[in-house]
Amino acid sequence: MTNIFSAAARSQSGLVVVIQRVIAALDCIPLGFIALAARVFPAALFWQSGATKVAGWHLKPSAIALFQNEYRLPLIDPTIAACAAAFAEHFFPILLVIGLATRFAALALLLMTAVIEIFVYPAAWPTHGVWATCFLLLIAKGPGAISLDHLIARRYKKIRLPPRTG
């Protein structure tokens, strides 16, 4: 009877070792790659949405109609809302992709996501939750090593200011 239990304990400990090795391997994934994915993929979604609102450098009439008839945001003129959305959906994704002012851009798109969720498509909370998760990761942890923010921070860490006196 003890042989059965010891064999079960050995196989269980073997499973524990395998799980520990898998976890250790997953722990080796650099945060920089995860942050890069959290920047690029939501940026692509917002860029694509912005592209549907413009023709060249001009706002499409259909974008204004969308804000008048479907989105119906409170307290803001549909033309202003369409212009602001088209600008934000192009400007902030560029910042995210290059990793410049990343936390600011992620916060702006998180707020935009909240507006979309609350006022426009409340039933799309699973999708908006995924976007929000990416933005919260970037706000909390930063853009990672593959970013202009990281390069700028490294450069300024090398420059030491002299200590203040009196």
Image (cartoon, rainbow, N blue to C red):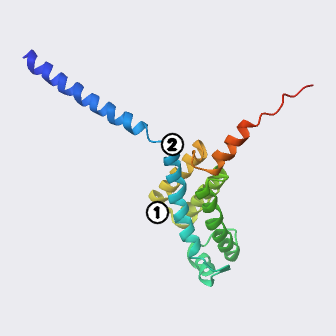
Q: Nearer the viewer, residue 85 or 55?
A: 55
Give how far across and how far down residue 150 sits, in percent: 63, 45
35 relative to 25 in the view: left or right: right
User: Mark 2 or mark 1, which has the lower sequence index?
Assistant: 2
- Say which amino acid is labelled 1: Ala
Q: Where is mark 2, residue-wise?
A: 31
Other-residue count near label 1 (Cα within 10 Å), few / some / many at <14 / 14–19 / ≥20: few
The quadrant where residue 56 appears:
bottom right
Image mark for residue 123: 1
**Secondary structure found at label 2:** helix
Q: Nearer the viewer, residue 92 or 63?
A: 92
Image position, residue 158 (x, y; %): 72, 36
Q: Quadrant of the C terminus?
A: top right
Q: Which mark is residue 22?
A: none
The 10 Å Cα crowd at callout 2, few under 14, some 14 to 19, many 20 or more, is some
Residue type at numbered disc 2:
Leu
47 left or right of 9 in image:
right
* Residue sitting farthest toward the right: 166
Coordinates of residue 65 in the picture (x, y in percent)? 60, 81
The image shows residue 3 at horizontal and vertical percentages of 9, 17
